[in-house]
Image (spheres, rainbow, N blue to C red):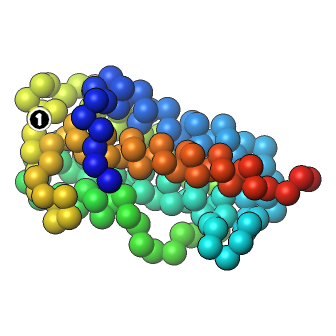
């Protein structure tokens, strides 16, 4: 996945800020049976996607804070987006989304306060090579927008109640 160079800072901040609420809007009102519905063996459940978005979003935000606040020169940026552990679906999806929303608001506030020089701060990732804060934010936004589409598609596959 390549960062979209056409996305400016405000575009990225808007996408990052809206993503948790958009996911919540899509799954709001779905009961546990519908969240746990698996259309086929190769399909994740809605709950699994929501948990992945929350886990990856929280990890990506932590990586961003590490780069911005700690001035880290090596950050596991791509690994944050590719959570490999089995999703812990025991916690309610709405609680997970609320946690991500809270973390994301703080991250967006931090990003809004960055100077031009800080937005261009570069760090090294084992998988991505050298990347700056803006490009990492673009990757996070692209990752989350892809999962928003996945959530919409999985909802379309739900059987009628």
Tag 1's secondary structure? loop
Q: Is residue 59 visible?
A: yes
* Left-right relation of 83 to 41: left
> Is the residue marked by circle 1 packed among few (<14), some (14-19), or many (20+) residues within 10 Å?
some
In the image, residue 40 above or below residue 78: below
Query: How many numbered markers are drawn?
Result: 1
Q: Position of residue 28 (x, y in %)?
A: 72, 42
Foreground of the two, 127 or 22: 127
* Left-right relation of 67 to 99: left
Residue located 56% across and 70% down the image: 88
Q: Which residue is mark 1?
A: 120
Residue located 89% across and 52% down the image: 160
* Left-right relation of 35 to 22: right
Q: Position of residue 85 (x, y in %)?
A: 45, 74
Q: Position of residue 133 (x, y in %)?
A: 19, 41
Foreground of the two, 103 or 84: 84
Residue 127 occupies quadrant: bottom left
Residue located 91% across and 53% down the image: 161
Q: Is residue 70 visible?
A: no
- Name the outermost residue toward the right: 161
Residue located 14% across and 25% down the image: 115
* Left-right relation of 104 to 158: left
In the image, residue 109 above or below residue 45: above
Q: Position of residue 60 (x, y in %)?
A: 33, 52
């Amino acid at each position: 996945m390549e960062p979209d160079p056409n996305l400016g800072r405000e575009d990225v901040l808007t996408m990052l800020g809206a993503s948790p609420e958009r996911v919540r809007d899509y799954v709001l009102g779905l009961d546990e049976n519908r969240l746990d519905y698996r259309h086929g063996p190769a399909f994740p459940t809605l709950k699994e996607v929501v948990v992945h978005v929350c886990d990856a979003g929280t990890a990506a935000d932590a990586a961003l804070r590490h780069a911005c606040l700690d001035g880290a020169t090596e950050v596991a940026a791509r690994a944050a987006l590719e959570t490999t552990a089995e999703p812990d679906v025991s916690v309610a999806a709405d609680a997970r989304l609320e946690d991500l929303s809270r973390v994301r608001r703080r991250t967006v506030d931090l990003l809004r306060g960055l100077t031009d020089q800080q937005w261009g701060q570069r760090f090294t990732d084992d998988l991505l090579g050298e990347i700056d804060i803006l490009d990492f934010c673009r990757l996070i936004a692209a990752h989350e927008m892809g999962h928003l589409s996945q959530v919409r598609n999985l909802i379309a596959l739900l059987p009628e109640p």
